[in-house]
Image (spheres, rainbow, N blue to C red):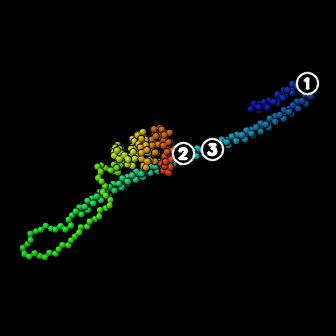
């Protein structure tokens, strides 16, 4: 704008300079001629300034249009990016929810499988008892006398009637099954203890279930069901807000029962407990160990989702 002001006042300055340079002895005719020339120059200069102003206005208009178009493009791009971010967040939330649901379903299936195993063990025990009773019954039948006569009674007076000899009846002997009867133990079996503890756990009797799982571990420390017992002790600790104790129980499953089917879930739930204790580095190591050991398990898929979007506590 300062440049335009200079250009506007340039004709006046030029006019003043021209008047100042006129010779003092010039006549009226010479002055008029110079004034006409000066006026002509002034008109040309004003036209040039007007043309320059018009060109500048056009350029400013074009520049404003370009700036407006750029601003509109930036706004549209910002809206598109926000929409993409929202879609990604919704997709991630949906994936996490599906992973949680799938993990819950797998956990429920594992629990049902454990219960079926416990029932199968009970049925096998009952079958063993039935076979034992059958063997005892067979032994009693084998010990019965084959030709025992009836007790004698006083003979009636008169000639004795002819009596036909009774046919010999052999007692059928059922062959004993090849499987021997299980030895009677002093206390309940590991299956029975586990079934009782698991039933109390499923009904929410956590203190009683914890005591029963502990009894199972004490009585059968090397049984694979004791690994399950440690896992459910960790679950009870999580539900009763004891994450530190839960981590120790999960470690027992992972370290001492290498063939236990609860190991992937133990890794995952241990990581969740560590996140709740704000031990993010340890939780990340646990999730990576789970993915490396069991890459195709549902828990591994959930661990990947958890690494992508760590839980906030």
Residue marked by disc 2 = 89
Tell me the tag on residue 77: 3
Residue 218 % position (x, y)? 34, 44
**In the figure, 233 relative to 127: above or below?**
above
Q: Residue at (18%, 72%) from the top-left corner? A: 166
Q: Can you tell which of label 2 and label 3 is closer to the viewer?
A: 2
Sequence-first tag of 2 and 3: 3
Residue 223 % position (x, y)? 37, 48
- The answer to whether marks 1 and 3 mark residues whose Cβ atoms lie closer than 8 Å is no
The residue closer to the viewer here, 51 or 122, is 122
Sequence-first tag of 2 and 1: 1
Q: CA distance from mark 2 to mark 1?
A: 86 Å
- The answer to whether marks 2 and 3 mark residues whose Cβ atoms lie closer than 8 Å is no
Residue 133 % position (x, y)? 27, 59
Residue marked by disc 1 = 23
Secondary structure under badge 2? helix
Secondary structure under badge 1? loop
The residue closer to the viewer here, 64 or 291, is 291
Q: Residue at (38%, 54%) from the top-left corner? A: 116
Sequence-first tag of 1 and 3: 1
- Would residue 240 be found to the left or right of residue 145 on screen? right
Q: Can you tell which of label 2 and label 1 is closer to the viewer?
A: 2
Secondary structure under badge 3? helix
Tell me the tag on residue 53: none
**In the figure, 238 relative to 38: above or below?**
below
Residue 256 % position (x, y)? 42, 45
Q: Residue at (60%, 45%) from the top-left corner? A: 80
- The answer to whether marks 2 and 1 mark residues whose Cβ atoms lie closer than 8 Å is no
In the rendered view of the protein, which quadrant contains the N terminus? top right
Q: CA distance from mark 1 to mark 3?
A: 70 Å
Q: Which residue appears farthest toward the top when viewing the image? A: 24
Other-residue count near label 3 (Cα within 10 Å), few / some / many at <14 / 14–19 / ≥20? few
């Amino acid at each position: 704008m300062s440049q335009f002001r200079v250009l506007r006042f340039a004709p006046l300055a030029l006019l003043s300079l021209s008047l100042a340079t006129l010779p003092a002895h010039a006549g009226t005719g010479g002055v008029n001629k110079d004034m006409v020339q000066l006026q002509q120059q002034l008109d040309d200069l004003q036209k040039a300034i007007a043309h320059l102003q018009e060109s500048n206005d056009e350029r400013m208009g074009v520049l404003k249009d370009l700036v407006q178009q750029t601003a509109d493009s930036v706004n549209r791009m910002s809206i598109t990016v926000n929409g993409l971010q929202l879609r990604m967040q919704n997709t991630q939330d949906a994936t996490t929810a599906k992973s949680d649901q799938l993990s819950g379903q797998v956990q429920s299936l594992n629990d049902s499988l454990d219960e079926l195993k416990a029932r199968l063990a009970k049925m096998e025990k009952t079958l063993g008892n039935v076979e034992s009773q059958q063997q005892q019954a067979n032994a009693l039948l084998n010990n019965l006398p084959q030709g025992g006569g009836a007790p004698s009674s006083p003979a009636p007076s008169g000639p004795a009637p002819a009596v036909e000899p009774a046919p010999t009846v052999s007692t059928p002997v059922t062959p004993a099954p090849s499987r021997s009867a299980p030895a009677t133990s002093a206390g309940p079996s590991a299956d029975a203890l586990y079934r009782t503890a698991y039933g109390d756990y499923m009904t929410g009797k956590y203190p009683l279930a914890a005591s029963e799982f502990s009894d199972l571990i004490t009585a059968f420390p090397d049984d694979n069901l004791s690994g399950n017992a440690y896992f459910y002790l960790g679950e009870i600790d999580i539900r009763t807000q004891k994450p530190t104790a839960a981590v120790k129980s999960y470690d027992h499953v992972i370290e001492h029962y290498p063939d236990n089917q609860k190991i992937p879930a133990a890794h995952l739930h241990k990581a969740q407990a560590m996140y709740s204790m704000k031990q993010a580095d340890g939780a990340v190591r646990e999730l990576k160990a789970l993915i490396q050991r069991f890459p195709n398990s549902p828990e591994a898929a959930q661990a990947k989702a958890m690494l992508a979007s760590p839980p906030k506590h």
